[in-house]
Image: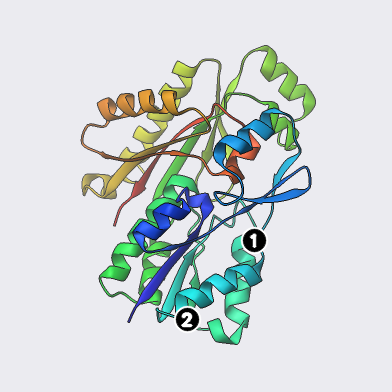
Amino acid sequence: MKTAIMTDSNSGITQNEAKEMGIYVVPMPVLIDTEEFFEDLTISQEQFYEKLKADAQVSTSQPNPINVGELWDKALETADEVVYIPMSSGLSETCHTLQHFAETEEKYKGKVFVIDNQRISITQRQSVLDALKLAKEGKSGKEIAKWLLDTKLTASIYIMVDTLKYLKKGGRLTPAVAAIGTLFHIKPVLQIQGFKLDQYAKVTKLSAAKKTMIDALKKDLETRFKAEYEAGKMIISIAHTENFAEAEKFKTELQEVFPNLKMKFVDPLSLSVSCHIGPGALACACMIEY
């Protein structure tokens, strides 16, 4: 049995990387001043940030199920099953929409598994790599789905936001709170624990933000993920929004704190997250590796 692995561009996996890996990536749509673009196909990271900084009206939308279905059809030409790993349902309705489509469209029943394993960005990318390993071992779609769901919450992301401007624009902060935060140079540290983007802490300096995120990872590894950590199954990664130089510095700092953990990625955050938090953000994550 051959199982194809598919994800969306929220994983940070580019179309070129997908070809090299032998997987499929659905490009996520982004609306900029009502015009639709597709991540990594009709708009690059650089072009996106140019428009964002120019105060364009930027939002995300769901991919057309018919277009996704066409990619499923293509995968099923050479595979028996498809495991599709979209972004977390806690951040978008895309997952639920495509789950319903796979379950109600006769030709996909029992062949396409849409996995809601609550991942995004670097943790979603790792899920794809884990699924790919399992598929190469000959595991079925159902077996891969079980592993991904059993381990879905063995991952944690912390994000430092450099500016409150985009959280305000997205309605996540009131104008008054945003004004006070800007006045006092507050840099919120947010978290994603499988579901929504939530506040974790408030700091005023980059150094304090990095210390807060490192301490948060330490706590997770020593408590929630203790068994996996002691068994050598956990890895760490970094993500950022147009902040590569600082991400590389942070990589060195994390490796000094966690010398026994593998540093897997230093990736740009997907556009679906970036449009809400803006440029200059820095994130770190720990997650299980198959």
Q: Amino acid at mark 1?
A: Pro
| Crowdedness near tag 2: few (<14), some (14–19) or many (≥20) residues, C-alpha within 10 Å | many
Q: Is residue 190 left or right of residue 183?
A: left
Q: Position of residue 42 (x, y in %)?
A: 61, 49
Quadrant of the rendering where the C terminus is positioned:
bottom left
Q: Is residue 222 above or below residue 18?
A: above
Q: Position of residue 184 (x, y in %)?
A: 65, 12
Q: Is residue 153 visible?
A: no
Which residue is labeled 1 in the image? 63
Q: Earlier in the sequence, mark 2 or mark 1?
A: 1
| Quadrant in which residue 83 is drawn | bottom left
Q: Position of residue 272 (x, y in %)?
A: 60, 46
Q: Secondary structure at mark 1?
A: loop
Quadrant of the rendering where the N terminus is positioned:
bottom left
Which residue is labeled 2 in the image? 111
Which residue: 76% across, 38% down?
A: 57
Q: Is residue 96 above or below residue 236?
A: below
Q: Is residue 93 visible?
A: yes
Relative depth, front residue between 204 and 120 = 120
Which residue: 68% across, 17% down?
A: 182
Q: Amino acid at mark 2?
A: Lys
Separation of marks 2 and 1 at Cα, in angstroms: 20 Å
Q: Which mark is residue 109?
A: none
